[in-house]
């Protein structure tokens, strides 16, 4: 890997030529000491191969290997030059890179992605390696390490989730006995007909009317009784509107930007700013969209798609004592949202949905153990109390990283990041059908390794790495799957559910 | 009120001059019959005062009074002309208004608002009246009645809520006995110190940690037990993400556009559209805002600020039988959001909050009766069960219309649209202090008259007007006010609350 940078350092002295001898010495010392420090192999360090003076600028060409990369070298040079020239009251204002050439040995991957980074002006295939040409990198871009991340991005061996898990995905790790089905219709259609749900104009949104709500509440209470409380999860209320910074830090935004909803706050405090919009709306009786857009800030939030993001933010930067671990919480305080690109479907696949979200944090061993406990308890509950036919699949779509998203090499990845509890939907076809959602994913059991604790800088005082995990029960789906197997006849339902629902009463005037 | 329109009708015949005699007759008959039909006073009808032919266009000048207004007249003329010319296979494609002058007698109001409607090119003061000049009104603007709404907007006597209620606002209609306070500190500060809540980076958002959540849940259950269920409200789950069309129809958007959050869906289904954004984010480690904005649709939703909007949409266009009334529902399925322009405050005034929202619909008498019942039950509950010092104030900020928003004259407005249940916050000052939130509004009892049933076209089969009402219990505020009076010592709390909270357990590692 070779780097070649052409750029300049800007000083405060317009007659720099007068100090040529000092600069000559600076360059010499830089090449002999400053730019090779820390590199075992001098070949992999950096070297100034050319330099010149123009007014207050020192032009340099720096070539390097991978150890002291040219963009790091120019920053080192700046610091050293500032020290030396400082004695003569000359400052070094900033550095700038006019041209940057990076050569990387093959094999490389995702090369075509680079065109989306606007500093890249060309990519050349040189047979055994590729040459990437960049232009106009300011101090900001040099310092924050854009070039390093660019090289990382095209280097193979950076596993994505899809690759890491390919061998195991799809394996059924547990399953209930085969049960006889009482119902074979589409629960969405029947629920609509009976007035248990109603259509809402928003994409993937529905009204859940009293009978459906009663069932959903019953399932929620039962999960708390059989799983949540016995395993010691304590309830809190997590914010549902997530500042972009948190979603970005969690690398959620980078993974699936098209999979969520974005939120804008109004731009102005002063009421009179909104008057033109209001007047136009009152006179035309049509929403003035252009005016509205001017009144809003840039998107500043997402609607939480995964429900646990605020938990990691809560502990951001904290150091936990070992005896405080594990921490187990549960949130069921409101809907979360995912944008699904597919067309309109039934209530088994919606944009707005309710979920019981369990999150835990602790040492690796603790986290795996908790995952096993919730998995056991939940399977048992679904089998015995809800009396549903279910299975657990090893899943590949871990929710915290998109399938094609790069895994940081310094993050510990669990061997079994996600199990999915799936419930059979008889109306979709036979059990072995390959149709989508014949087995509907109703809950998932996730281990995140150190993904979140690293990104949110959460540490254990003992120095051991902290893991997190989460277990979400999709209440909307759970109720749908329940109806798909048990049907809408209250008397056919399992006793524990009947005891909590008590009676079914719809709203008048709807069906 | 006088209207003068200069415009043209476009026909499909390029040699219209050949049919001058027919057109002459059309204009004559229009003036004698078509344009005066329905107006008792001919002076208030419309008259074509000038006309000419140019290629395929018929230019007209129409002057009118208030009965058959000039913009309605040109549409009548179009229809009549199409009938007559149709016999000769000549069509009338469209009409257009080049200039429109409206003269309105004084007094007028809000004249300065008109500059925000971009068709207005001038306003002149003529002493006893004002002249408003408009330009270039297309068929769309003429048909949807922009000019009528413009005149309405400046006509005085169109009451706003503020004016309608001015005399009564601020009156205390009920109050509890004075009670002795156990606590005098700011609950936000103490809750933070004890780890009952935690700060969250979003504006006006907080974490409600297990002790606070337990208290909030207890209050929720108690309200259900003492108020909601005894009065026959049935629970449903209403969507929380509201399409703009619904908010606009409810006239919520026009009232306080700066008081809510707006939501954008992603623009594209194809994953590859998001690649440039993802690559730039991965390389720069900075959120690429410009790219993100290009990937989003225009705002299409608001986060529900009032929680009951979807209820009216549920019954949109329906006709209800009298015996089905009243309908009473309750929703407690998730947070709602208001954008508050003020700076950072404690948990008594937040952007994201949880509420029990009761909504009802029925005949006028039924709705008032239900309002009285919930008011009685709630006051009794707050007094006896929560043992808080409270009062009920006649409030002016009805939530369904902004204070300065025009009331449609054909909407029935209740005499007492809003009562507010306020709870004393000792840390803010003495009971008679004028400081904000010394008496914190924790619940409100609202009657909307026919505002929603008219805008959502909901009717009773008997022909009687349908009213709606709602009663919201701010759970976040209720818990805050509870802590402000009773403090954080579990043993000091009323028995019913203690029985439900059971024990207080915080999260480790936070305080």
Image (cartoon, coloured by chain):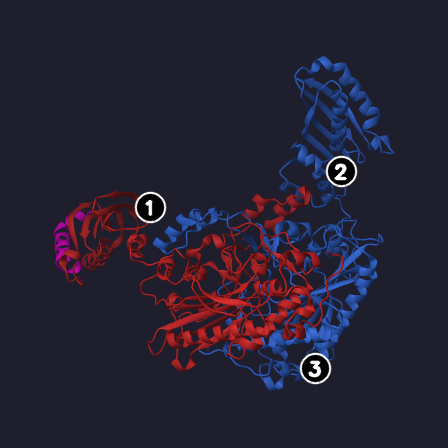
Chain colours: A blue, B red
Q: In the figure, is residue A289 to the left or right of A243?
A: left
Q: Mark 1 — residue? A: B112
Q: Secondary structure at mark 2?
A: strand
Q: Mark 3 — residue? A: A179
**Residue B94 in picture, x, y percent from top left:** 27, 53
Q: Mark 2 — residue? A: A104
Q: Is residue A364 magenta?
A: no
Task: Name the outermost residue toward the right.
Answer: A40
**What count of labels does the image hold?**
3
**Camera-nearest label, 1 or 2:** 1
Q: Residue at x 38, y 56 (%)?
A: B405
- Per the rendered image, the range of residues in magenta is B15-35
Q: Is residue B34 magenta?
A: yes
Q: In the figure, is residue A99 to the left or right of B420?
A: right
Q: Quadrant of residue B369?
A: bottom left
**Residue A476 in picture, x, y percent from top left:** 61, 70
Mark 1 touches mark 2? (CB < 8 Å): no
Q: Residues within 10 Å of mark 1 (few under 14, many from 20)?
A: few
Q: Chain of mark 2?
A: A
Q: Is residue A432 visible?
A: no
**Residue B432 in picture, x, y percent from top left:** 50, 59
Label 1 vs label 2: CA separation? 66 Å
Q: Residue at x 81, y 27 (%)?
A: A34
């Amino acid at each position: 890997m070779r780097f070649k940078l052409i750029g300049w350092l800007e000083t405060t002295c317009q007659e720099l030529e007068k100090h040529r001898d000092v600069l000559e010495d600076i360059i010499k010392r830089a090449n002999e000491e400053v730019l090779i420090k820390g590199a075992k192999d001098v070949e992999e360090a950096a070297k100034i191969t050319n330099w010149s003076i123009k007014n207050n600028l020192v032009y340099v060409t720096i070539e390097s290997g991978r150890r002291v990369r040219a963009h790091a070298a120019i920053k080192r040079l700046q610091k050293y030059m500032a020290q030396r020239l400082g004695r003569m009251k000359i400052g070094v204002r900033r550095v700038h890179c006019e041209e940057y050439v990076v050569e990387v040995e093959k094999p490389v991957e995702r090369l075509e992605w680079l065109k989306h980074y606007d500093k890249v002006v060309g990519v050349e295939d040189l047979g055994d390696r590729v040459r990437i040409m960049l232009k106009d990198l300011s101090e900001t871009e040099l310092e924050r390490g854009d070039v390093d991340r660019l090289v990382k991005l095209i280097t193979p061996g950076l596993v994505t989730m899809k690759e890491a898990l390919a061998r195991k995905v799809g394996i059924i790790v547990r399953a209930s006995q085969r049960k006889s089905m009482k119902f074979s219709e589409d629960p969405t259609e029947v629920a609509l007909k009976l007035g248990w749900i109603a259509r809402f104009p928003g994409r993937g949104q529905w009204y859940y009317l009293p009978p459906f709500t009663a069932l959903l509440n019953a399932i929620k209470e039962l999960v708390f009784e059989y799983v949540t409380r016995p395993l010691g999860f304590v309830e809190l209320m997590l914010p549902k509107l997530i500042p972009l910074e948190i979603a970005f830090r969690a690398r959620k935004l980078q993974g699936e930007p098209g999979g969520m909803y974005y939120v804008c706050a109004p731009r102005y405090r002063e009421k009179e700013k909104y008057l033109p919009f209001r007047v136009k709306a009152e006179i035309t009786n049509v929403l003035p969209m252009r005016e509205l857009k001017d009144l809003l800030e840039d998107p500043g939030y997402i609607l939480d798609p995964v429900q646990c993001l605020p938990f990691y933010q809560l502990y951001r930067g904290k150091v936990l004592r070992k005896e405080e671990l594990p921490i187990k919480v549960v949130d069921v305080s409101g809907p979360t949202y995912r944008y699904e690109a597919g067309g309109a479907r039934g209530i088994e696949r919606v944009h707005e949905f309710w979920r019981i979200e369990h999150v835990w944090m602790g040492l690796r061993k603790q986290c795996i153990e908790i995952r096993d406990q919730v998995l056991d308890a939940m399977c048992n509950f679904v089998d015995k109390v809800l009396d549903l036919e279910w299975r657990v699949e090893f899943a590949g779509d871990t929710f915290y990283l998109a399938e094609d998203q790069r895994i940081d090499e310094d993050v510990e990845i669990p061997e079994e990041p996600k199990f999915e509890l799936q419930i059979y939907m008889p109306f979709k076809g036979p059990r072995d059908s390959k149709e989508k959602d014949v087995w509907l994913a109703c809950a998932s059991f996730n281990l995140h390794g150190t993904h979140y604790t690293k990104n949110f800088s959460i540490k254990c005082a003992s120095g051991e790495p902290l893991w997190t995990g989460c277990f979400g029960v999709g209440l909307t789906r759970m109720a749908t799957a329940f109806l798909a197997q048990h049907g809408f006849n209250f008397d056919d339902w399992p006793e524990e559910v009947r005891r909590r629902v008590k009676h079914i009463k719809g709203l008048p005037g709807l069906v």
